Image (spheres, helix red, strand yellow):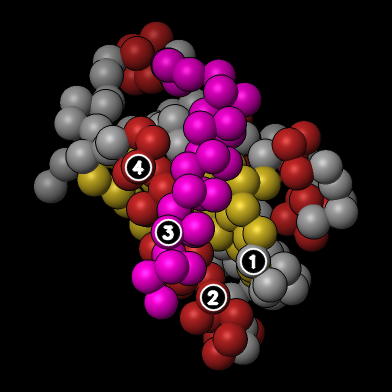
Amino acid sequence: MERIFAPWRIRYILAPKPRDCVFCNALKMDEREVLVVYKAKKSYVVMNRNPYNPGHVMVCPNRHVASLEDLSEEEMLEMMQLTKLAIKAIRHCMNPDGFNVGVNIGKVAGAGIAEHLHIHVVPRWNGDTSFMPVLADVQVVPEALEETYEKLRESFNVISDCSKHES
């Protein structure tokens, strides 16, 4: 079993959290400012500001719910459709070798924001881990968030347009 260490994440985990829900607030703010790359009717896709890898996005329900069992069938279906779309869009513009897709429910399970459910979609490349985070306490993200945002937003638009014509 391969272990992936991300010691830089502990600063985020232990840092004070805003009182308001960042995922709920994202729907009220400028999409570019909060890095929302795609919106659907009941959910949306947003980039992670503290990514494990470039292109790390989260699929979030619009409604403030903490767990999968709190979702309606429509919300759950749309979130899985957006997860699929996210994988296609990231594959289209970033060409990763694989993905980690997951949900952490509750603080004890590793949820940094436990009160608002979200699905992580993390692109992975062969050899994408290095000694830098472990030995130097430095995370190397090879592309600015804003550059990744522009690529992903364009890719989501292209892929979602193609998906509409496939139906």
Query: Which residue is the site of mark 2?
Result: 78
Who comes first in sequence, dot 2 or dot 1?
Answer: 1
Q: Is residue 98 magenta?
A: no
Query: The disc labelled 2 sits on which kind of residue?
Result: Glu
Query: The disc labelled 1 sits on which kind of residue?
Result: Ala
Q: Is residue 142 magenta?
A: yes
Which percent across, then down, holds residue 71? 61, 83
Q: Mark 4 or mark 3: which is in front?
A: 3
Q: Is residue 135 left or right of residue 160?
A: left
Query: Which residue is the site of mark 1?
Result: 40
Magenta: main secondary structure equals helix
What residue appears at the point 37 percent right and 70 percent down from the top-left corner? 166
Q: Are marks 3 and 1 in contact (CB under 8 Å)?
A: no
Query: The disc labelled 3 sits on which kind of residue?
Result: Cys
Q: Which residues are magenta?
A: 140-167
Which residue is the extreme one toward the left? Answer: 1
Which percent across, then down, holds residue 50? 57, 34
Marks 4 and 3 sit apart, C-alpha to C-alpha, by: 12 Å
Marks 2 and 4 sit apart, C-alpha to C-alpha, by: 21 Å
